[in-house]
């Protein structure tokens, strides 16, 4: 299944299931959970499969699939080429920072280059969405806790990211990152490690890597994070970006108004966003 969150014509938020052409407004079904995170927590997605009124996907505004995750955990330095291009050592444990929901937009919405900086960079990533709660999850059990996968752009304001050793400032400017276009359930994706991630800027390939090149694997990320905090349905883990980010290219490549960023993962889809300047 492909699970989406969106705005109806009247501006109200809902969620549903799509085949990429038609959306079924599952949130309109009497007694349906209020949002997709609640639906994941209820574990009743099969009952609601393709239910609700249907209409064209192209006619709605997509939100991030989970509009307000309880946790957005982002993994830094998790592909060897990106580790090498930054000049840092390979971490022995996951390097984790957090994003806030306000920093993300959905597929088709515009990313905002902030007025404070012109060093606006892209980072194509695989996002893992939690479907089953757990604490102290063993790596062998981690796959059972995954609701599905999505594309993620961990948009980064590089000068603010590098003001100190803490990444938070550069990762949380409002509407600087993207998440979507939907969550694809594991049964539809198949082997996630056999998929490939590609990031294109204005149609040009800037990042391209197999997901199997992750330095710290998905089960280990889930196990580590769940040792610290209970993972709950709707929580998001962005698993890291490969080499090829704009900050480390020669010449450097930063996002400017009018550009388009596409993050494509085979088996999942393509997350596409244009870029505008912040309205002063």
Image: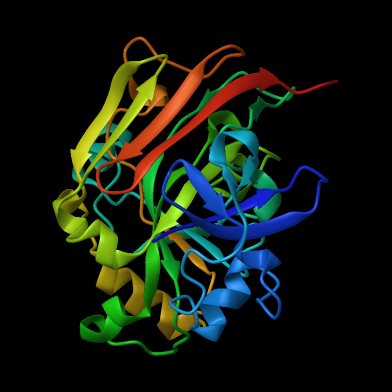
The spot of residue 206 in percent (x, y) is: 30, 23
Name which residue lies at 53% across and 69% down. Answer: 235
The spot of residue 144 in percent (x, y) is: 31, 81
Colouring used for the render: rainbow
In depth, the one of 64 and 88 nearer the eye is 64
In depth, the one of 49 and 1 nearer the eye is 49
Q: In this view, does 25 lie above or below 125?
A: below
Q: Is residue 61 above or below residue 221?
A: above
Q: In this view, does 121 lie to the left or right of 79?
A: right
Residue 127 image-quadrant placement: bottom left
In depth, the one of 212 and 32 nearer the eye is 32
Q: Quadrant of the C terminus?
A: top right
User: Is residue 92 visible to us here?
Assistant: no
Q: In which quarter of the image is the N terminus?
A: bottom left
Q: Is residue 139 left or right of residue 114?
A: left
The spot of residue 231 in percent (x, y) is: 49, 79
Q: In this view, does 84 lie to the left or right of 44?
A: left
Name which residue lies at 29% across and 52% down. Answer: 78
Q: In this view, does 129 lie above or below 115?
A: below
């Amino acid at each position: 299944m492909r699970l989406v969150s969106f705005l109806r014509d009247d501006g109200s938020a809902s969620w549903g299931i799509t085949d990429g052409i038609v959306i079924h407004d599952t949130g309109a079904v009497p007694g349906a959970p209020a949002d997709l995170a609640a639906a994941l927590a209820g574990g009743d997605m099969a009952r609601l499969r393709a239910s609700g009124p249907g209409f064209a996907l192209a006619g709605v505004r997509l939100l991030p699939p989970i509009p307000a995750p309880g946790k957005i955990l982002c993994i830094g330095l998790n592909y060897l080429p990106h580790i090498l291009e930054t000049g840092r050592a390979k971490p022995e444990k996951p390097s984790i920072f957090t994003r806030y929901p306000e920093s993300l937009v959905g597929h088709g919405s515009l990313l905002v280059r902030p007025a404070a900086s012109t060093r606006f960079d892209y980072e194509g990533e695989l996002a893992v969405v939690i479907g089953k709660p757990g604490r102290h999850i063993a790596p062998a059990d981690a796959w059972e806790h995954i609701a599905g996968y999505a594309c993620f752009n961990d948009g980064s304001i590089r000068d603010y990211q590098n003001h100190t050793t803490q990444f938070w400032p550069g990762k949380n400017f409002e509407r600087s990152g993207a998440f979507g276009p939907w969550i694809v359930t594991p049964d539809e994706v198949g082997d996630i490690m056999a998929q490939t991630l590609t990031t294109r800027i204005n149609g040009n390939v800037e990042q391209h890597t197999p997901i199997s090149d992750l330095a710290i694997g998905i089960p280990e990320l889930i196990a580590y994070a769940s040792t610290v905090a209970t993972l709950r349905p709707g929580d998001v883990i962005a698993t890291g970006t490969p080499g090829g980010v704009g900050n480390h290219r020669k010449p450097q490549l930063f996002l400017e108004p009018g550009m388009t960023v596409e993050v494509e993962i085979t088996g999942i889809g393509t997350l596409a966003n244009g870029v505008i300047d912040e309205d002063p």
